[in-house]
Image (cartoon, rainbow, N blue to C red):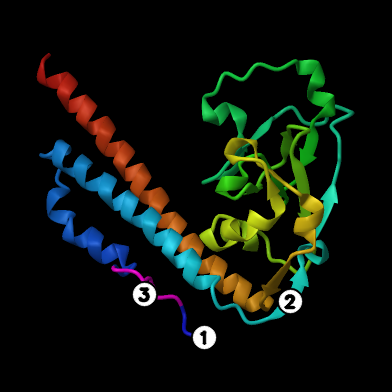
Amino acid sequence: MAPYTGYEPVADTQFSCNVDEWHSRQSHKRTLGVPDCVSCAASPLIKDCVVCRSAIIEKLYSKIHGKEYSYGQLFKVVNERNKQIEYSNILSASQEKGMVNRYDLNLDIQFERNNIITYKIVRKGDYVIHLRSFQGGFAFSDKLGVCSPAYTILRPNSLLEFGYLSYYFMSYRFIKSLIIVTYGIRDGRSINVEEWLNMKIVIPSKEHQLHILKVLKSVEEKIKNEETYATCLSNQRKYLLHHMFI
């Protein structure tokens, strides 16, 4: 298999995913003297990277060669409760970033601290079925913490590389497949876990799983870098505007 070069053409789309090339074409706008211009240039690039990531996910998971398993052969439903109050950091589901610390979301969610003993323990590598089934409903956790008892915790076995299905669970292909195991309408939809565990998926070799993860993590890194850059530009603009009138 050819190594990833940073350029991943995508079938059935009207663009290529060489975001670095697009980035270089915008470089003439990226000068310290024109913070408004560079700030405007950064936002479309981030959007292009996100669209590019979605297209690459669809492509990489579209023609997988390997062995077919049911989800029940790949995951175990776990129900560890925080009875000893071992963990106090509460995790919430985010479609884009998986399970995140609740305080990072800047949401003022009131709850009884005593109820934390009923919360479920989420461990690194777990997948969490939350309530937004129309968006996928599955969030990957790369951190340890606790979450709402309303969530279902899935713990993968050794057939899966760490985080391999985290991207697939965000794909249109996967979300479409959930139609037959979801009930209710939109926000009220719930996933029938037992039925979902009987559904089938083809899992490739560990080597191919690692290849897919390498490609997608490089795109994630690109998006993260651009978001950081955009934040720096915004801060610079505020600084310059502030000092212009001193």
**Farthest residue, direction right:** 83
Q: Say which of 246 and 123 sits in front.
A: 123
**Residue ID at (58%, 40%):** 186
Q: Count numbered badges in the picture.
A: 3
Q: CA distance from mark 2 to mark 1?
A: 22 Å
Other residues around mark 2 within 10 Å, as few (<14) / some (14–19) / many (≥20): few
Q: Is residue 147 above or below residue 168?
A: above
Q: Is residue 8 magenta?
A: yes
Q: Position of residue 104 (x, y in %)?
A: 54, 30
Mark 1 lies on a secondary structure that is loop
Give the amino acid type for the residue marked by disc 2 in the picture: Glu
Give the amino acid type for the residue marked by disc 3 in the picture: Pro
Q: Is residue 148 magenta?
A: no
In this rendering, position of residue 219 left or right of residue 237: right
Comparing labels 2 and 3, the label whose residue is closer to the camera: 2
Q: Position of residue 54 (x, y in %)?
A: 45, 59
Q: Of the numbered discs in the image, which one, if any, rests on residue 68?
A: 2
Q: Of the numbered discs in the image, which one, if any, rests on residue 1?
A: 1
Question: For mark 3, what is the residue?
Answer: 9
Q: Position of residue 185 (x, y in %)?
A: 61, 40
Q: Say which of 20 and 118 sits in front.
A: 118
Q: Position of residue 22 (x, y in %)?
A: 24, 62
Q: CA distance from mark 3 to mark 1?
A: 15 Å
Q: Say which of 225 and 94 sits in front.
A: 94
Q: Say which of 217 and 62 sits in front.
A: 62
Pointers 3 and 1 in contact (C-beta within 8 Å): no
